[in-house]
Amino acid sequence: MGGRRRENLAREVRAGLASTPKYLPARLGSDFRAVEPPGAGDGLPEYHLARAEAEILTIHAKAITARLPRPLAVAEFGPGNQSNAELLVGMLASACGVRMYMPIDDSDARRGGTLTRLAAAHRDAEVRAIIAEYDEGLRFARAVARCPVVAAWMASGIGRYQREEAANRLRALRGRLCPDDRLLLGIDLRKPSTEMLQSYDDAGGLLAESQRNTLRRINQELGGQFDPASFAYRVECDESDGLVRTFLVSNRAQRVWIERADIVADFAKGEALRTGQSYQYAPAEIRQLAQSAGLRVEAQWFDGNRRFSVSLLAGR
């Protein structure tokens, strides 16, 4: 991790651990692919996001690609689901022609295998990882692309942010797009709390382990001294607000030193550390979100159970 990115992460972690209640920055939230080989969690009966997104990309491939420019460059935000990344690029390459594929993230730890496979499968496309924040990464992608850019923010990554912040982040991305560019946005849809809970608390504990992985990342990148095994996983759902929150609960009183964040965090037994959140949206709320960011929804597609959506956004 570069110096500036490490400084930004340290500042965010310091602010979160100094708050009451404590939390970790939303962008640290990772999914089960952080701790398992690619695709290992796709079969989880409880975890619908990856399967629903893959269903949409497969069933609605013709309708999606019919609305996109040809040829194009793909800029994908965040690691997302690795098999779905390959599905997305393959779909766009066969229908539109992909000149460049540029995954954008603040860490390249989970990209190597996917990039190798994509480069081998699409030899006419340049595959280039961009290690940066999304806004800055899209600016760079837009500068080097020699054709229109389709930015893909999938796997409900935008749901990590509070609704106002989500609009602000979309607005910043909108400022980087040219008129012919488009944004594909995958967002989890509102659903009953029982379904919400099942989706984020799998019986095998894989999602719980992925949340402990955020502590390991802090240990590795910021010189932290977290003991991930000393935290239990908890999920809370608020159906009225369309919000799922995940926590790691300290199972003992403990003190944690984060060297590069220059902070000591004291945890009482039973104290909860918020590690992630996911806001869900109704289709009309997605249109409102886009409008508030200066974008318009050109089309929306849903899986058969209407649990997930992919929207195509363009500048107004």
Image (cartoon, grey):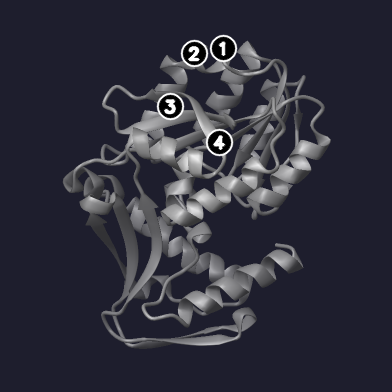
Q: Residue flagged by tag 3: what amino acid is it?
A: Ala
Cβ atoms at labels 2 and 1 below 8 Å apart: yes
Which disc is residue 54 wearing?
3
Q: Secondary structure at mark 1?
A: helix
The mark found on residue 63 in the picture is 2
Foreground pick, 290 / 143: 290
What residue is shown with label 1? Answer: 66
Q: CA distance from mark 4 to mark 1?
A: 20 Å
Q: Which of labels 4 and 1 is toward the front?
A: 4
- Earlier in the chain: of badge 3 and badge 2, it is 3
Place of residue 304 in the rendered image (x, y in percent of width and height, measured from the top left): 29, 22
Q: Is residue 32 visible?
A: yes
Secondary structure category for the residue under label 3: helix
Q: Which element is circle 4 on?
A: strand
Query: Which amino acid lies under the numbered mark 2 shown in the image of this protein?
Result: Ala
Category of crowding for the residue at label 2, using alpha-carbon neighbours closer than 10 angstroms: few (below 14), some (14–19), many (at least 20): few
Q: Say if 235 sits above or below 89 in the image.
A: below
In the image, is residue 14 above or below residue 296?
below
- SS for tag 2? helix
Q: Give residue 295's mark.
A: 4
Rounded to the nearest angstrom, the CA distance separating label 1 from label 3 is 18 Å
Q: Give the amino acid at mark 4.
A: Leu
Q: Position of residue 28 (x, y in %)?
A: 51, 60
Image quadrant holding the C terminus, namely top right
Graded by Cα atoms within 10 Å as few (under 14), some (14 to 19) or many (20 or more), the crowding at tag 3 reads: some
Mark 1 or 3: the one toward you? 1
Q: Check whether the beta carbons of the residues at disc 4 and disc 2 lie within 8 A of each other.
A: no
Pick whichever, 112 or 139, lies toward us: 139
